[in-house]
Amino acid sequence: GENVEQHPSTLSVQEGDSAVIKCTYSDSASNYFPWYKQELGKRPQLIIDIRSNVGEKKDQRIAVTLNKTAKHFSLHITETQPEDSAVYFCAASWGGNQFYFGTGTSLTVIP
Amino acid sequence: NAGVTQTPKFRVLKTGQSMTLLCAQDMNHEYMYWYRQDPGMGLRLIHYSVGEGTTAKGEVPDGYNVSRLKKQNFLLGLESAAPSQTSVYFCASTDSLRYGYTFGSGTRLTVV
């Protein structure tokens, strides 16, 4: 089955700096890659996703890039704000029966 | 339109007791999932269902049972609770793996 690795497990940045979280996947058939944000005590919520037919997608301060050849994808957050502090999960799917999740990155934005 | 609703939100059980967690979705989704989340362990899949009347095991199914008698409901049962089942449980649903999950708000279960 698919295996998704996520790095780093923890990340601290100063407010206003950028944050980058990286994930690698093992199954070349995977074609859909969502990212979830989970604030403390809350449910994970989908914040951005990318499909295998595009290399980059942006939504205001967040962007996701995909390198199919290397089988890795990354979440980029620019101009970080304290409200960006949360746990972020990447996931991958080839359209089967489930998503495969990374183990999460705890992001802390220091004011 | 409530999305995915989990009940209860909190529960404390004694070792050996049983309970059922209910997940209900009003989006007509085919796929439903139960995950557990433990500190530093991410989201681990317990059981899932790809349609009414179907269930399948995930990564950590031992000690749990599930049922999907109605399309909108997915029940997670603990027959004899153990302290190792202390966790936060999330239900999720989707109508296609081409789109992301919608998660419920979670159930915090403590087994003493």
Image: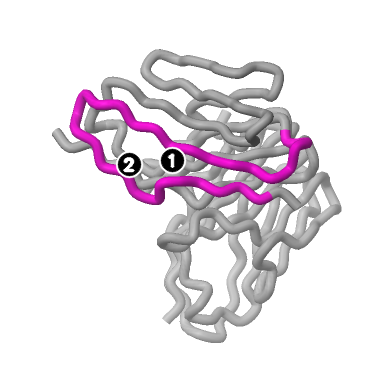
Residue A16 placement: quadrant: top left
Could you say where residue B33 lies in the image, as x and y percent from the top left?
67, 50
Say which mark, if any, is on residue B58.
Answer: none
Alpha carbons under labels 1 and 2: distance apart: 7 Å
Q: Residue at x 34, y 31 (%)?
A: A19
Q: How many marks?
A: 2
Q: Are marks 1 and 2 in contact (CB under 8 Å)?
A: yes
Q: Position of residue A79 (x, y in %)?
A: 27, 21
Q: Which picture quadrant has residue A25?
A: top right
Q: Quadrant of the N terminus of chain B?
A: top right
Is the residue at mark 1 from the same chain as the one at mark 2?
Answer: yes
Q: Which residue extends farthest front?
A: A70
Q: Is residue A107 visible?
A: yes
Residue range highlighted in magenta? A3-30
What is the secondary structure assignment of the residue under circle 2?
Answer: strand
Horizontally, residue A47 falls left or right of residue A108, namely right
Q: Write down the residue under mark 2.
A: A107
* Amino acid beneath label 2: Leu
Amino acid identity at mark 1:
Tyr
